[in-house]
Amino acid sequence: MKTTGKICLILFAFAILAFSFYWFVGRHALARVAASREARDELTSPPAESPSAQSPKVETGISEEDRDASIAALKKQILDVHPQLRAAERIVADRDNRLLQLALFLASEFPDAHPQLIPDDLQQLLSGLAPWDVVRVSAALKERAALLDRLVEIGQLPDFSTVALDDHQSASLASVAELSSMLAARARCQFETEDLEGALKTIRSTNALIECLESSGAASTEDAAAFSSAHLAHAVAICMAGDVPVTRETLMRVRTALSRPDRTLGSVIKDLIRNDWTTLFISCMDQDKRKPEEDGSKDAIEVSNLCAVRLQQISESTPEALRDGSALPDPQLGGMSSYALSSLTWLDEDIARVRAKWLERKQRAALWDAAVCIALGETPPTDPVTGKPFEVDPVDRVLTLPEDPDFPDLIAGSYQRAKQRIPLLK
């Protein structure tokens, strides 16, 4: 009986502690979803020379054509006040646009919402549930040759530009995360069957598709880019840093094929905010989600203010503040609509997710680059996140990320001390 009482007392105490913890976390989360009065008033207190910018209302109960014109006018008005929300536009011919052709192809190839992209038997081989067998994998990939050939072909297109895609086309880009595992497996099979030129072509094309996804500005495609990059890096590392020596020329050509333009974290986050603003504006003005008498203009203006303030904070932040997450201070509570509060929550969660993926990808790329530099007798880079040198085990030819107890908090607990073998040269 005494034992039972003690157990009940312990459970009660634990419940009190748990409640206190979640109360504290909830309070902190609530504090992050508010915005400053300056953000809220920026559009509703417009310059004297533009009095029409003050809380314009999109009329309800009018024709669809007139309503579209009113929404377009409101969007133009917002962009006149906050030009930094306007996405940079580059004109690229449709036939040459990697991102557009990729979206069009995937949307037509996989019209279903949740298609099976990889056959079960091949999935087991690629995921490691079955032992790697180059003959079986090559045979399975031949059955998907037309699909993979088209992806490689798209990856060779000369340029890309972020374009307006419909919902189905945008959603289809997420499938690259899974399809890239087949492209990476093809490159590995080509290496193992001594088709170096074929392997380099596959790597270059896959890398070009990843570059498109990284530059699209959407959090979902950033996720797809991160998974695709990991698939490709893993396949290359197995082939280049195994127990079989490779030539210096081969290693240098692979390094070149894997290189991509270096985008700063600030530019990545700013592209994300502009993309999210477009989505949030459309959502505000979607009359299907509102009562007939309701108008989303006020919410659209308030959300635009929030996104503009976040952009300004990012622009004024140092690279160190962007990396450690201190670039976005907690705004003040009060006076905001529930829609604006939830929009800020959604935006900040997207920023945190993209930031985490960028940090992890940047760190893994530097780890691979350091291994290649050591193999080639060059000075290796340090860890770009912690600034510390990578740990080297010369006996097993292994590099490891430096230990940093603070870093797991930076990327929401997904941190792992990754390892990378150093290539052997012939």
Image (cartoon, rainbow, N blue to C red):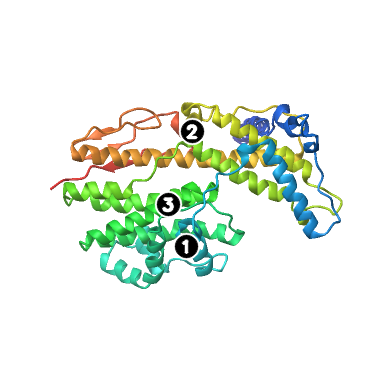
Write the residue at 49% across / 54% down: 92
Give, as a three-letter code, the residue at label 1: Arg
Q: Earlier in the sequence, mark 1 or mark 2?
A: 1
Q: Earlier in the sequence, mark 3 or mark 2?
A: 3
- The residue labelled by disc 3 is 210
> Looking at the image, can residue 412 be seen?
no
Disc 3 from disc 2: Cα separation: 24 Å
Write the residue at 22% across / 62% down: 195
Of residues 19 and 384, the one nearer the viewer is 384
Q: Could you say whether the residue bearing mark 3 is in a helix, strand or loop?
A: helix
Of residues 394 and 374, the one nearer the viewer is 374
Q: Place residue 209 in its image quadrant.
A: bottom left
> Looking at the image, can residue 321 be seen?
yes
Q: Position of residue 108 (x, y in %)?
A: 53, 69
In the rendered image, the vertical position of residue 292 relative to residue 402, given as above or below: below
Nearer the viewer's eye, disc 3 or disc 2? 3
Label placed on residue 410: 2
Write the residue at 47% across / 60% down: 102
